[in-house]
Image (cartoon, rainbow, N blue to C red):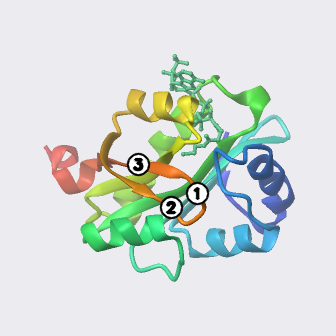
Amino acid sequence: MLREFVPADLTAVHAINDGEVPAVGSESPEALARIADQSTIALVAEVGTEIAGFCFVLPPGADYGSMNYAWFAERYDDFVYLDRVAIAPKFQRRGIGRILYAEVERLAAERRPTATDFALEVNLRPRNDRSLAFHAELGFVEVGQRETDYGARVAMMTKPLEAASGTAAT
Ligand SMILES: CC(C)(COP(=O)(O)OP(=O)(O)OC[C@H]1O[C@@H](n2cnc3c(N)ncnc32)[C@H](O)[C@@H]1OP(=O)(O)O)[C@@H](O)C(=O)NCCC(=O)NCCS
């Protein structure tokens, strides 16, 4: 089941996030809460009573210091930016990421109908093969690469959003 993130989810979300470093950046619970606050879409996936995964998606214009986010803001007028996604190891490869992204795309069409692109980055160094395979499967394409100030090299990836490309209306 997917639902909106609430502050009571923070401890579980923080544990999942920190369990997946360096695939995702390490953050304090407070920093994750700030990202959630700025998000236009913040979702958790629940399996029974357990939080299995989460994702946070920022709109353009957020007060967010990430240079990866800034890279997209310089090049795209209107986009949604997936700041992070992580599924707990025992729930990976069960289709939860795919369902989460389908819901992000549905909500983005509703909440940011003018956004043209779904943007994010994936680590090339250290190489995140799971995430590269996942995003390729879901239709994301590389639109650039950058060296980060935290030592990683990342692939900048986007996928067109349906509402803005007009396909949803036809
Ligand atoms: C990347 C991640 C979010 C994928 O979520 P998931 O719920 O495990 O993915 P799904 O089960 O929905 O996979 C959908 C498809 O993606 C591809 N895929 C996903 N994980 C894969 C893997 N480990 N190896 C190869 N292909 C993979 C497959 O095509 C899969 O379809 P299939 O299982 O029917 O073959 C998850 O592995 C994760 O949380 N990783 C750690 C954190 C991370 O890397 N976040 C991304 C940072 S950019």
> Vertical placement of 116 versus 93: above or below?
below
Q: Position of residue 74 (x, y in %)?
A: 30, 73
Residue drawn at the location 86% of the way across and 59% of the way down: 11
Left of 66 or right of it: where is 170? left
Residue drawn at the location 53% of the way across and 77% of the way down: 64
Q: Position of residue 87 (x, y in %)?
A: 69, 39
Q: Tell me the quarter of the picture where residue 29 sits.
A: bottom right
Label located before the other in sequence (1 or 3): 3
Under tag 2, what secondary structure?
loop
Under tag 1, what secondary structure?
loop
Q: Residues within 10 Å of mark 1 (few under 14, many from 20)?
A: few
Q: Amino acid at mark 3?
A: Glu
**Closer to the camera, 15 or 154?**
154
Q: Amino acid at mark 2?
A: Thr
Q: Tell me the quarter of the picture where residue 71 sits.
A: bottom left
Give the numbered dot on residue 105. 3
Give the numbered dot on residue 26. none
Q: In the image, is the residue at mark 1 within 8 Å of ligand 1 by its beta carbon? A: no
Left of 133 or right of it: where is 170? left
Q: Are marks 1 and 3 in contact (CB under 8 Å)?
A: no
Q: Residues within 10 Å of mark 2 (few under 14, many from 20)?
A: few
How far apart marks 2 and 1 lie (CA) works out to 6 Å
Q: Position of residue 76 (x, y in %)?
A: 26, 67
How far apart marks 3 and 2 lie (CA) works out to 27 Å
Q: Amino acid at mark 1?
A: Gly
Residue drawn at the location 72% of the way across and 48% of the way down: 21
Location of the C terminus by quadrant is top left
Give the labeled residue for mark 1: 151
Q: Are marks 2 and 1 in contact (CB under 8 Å)?
A: yes
Give the labeled residue for mark 2: 148
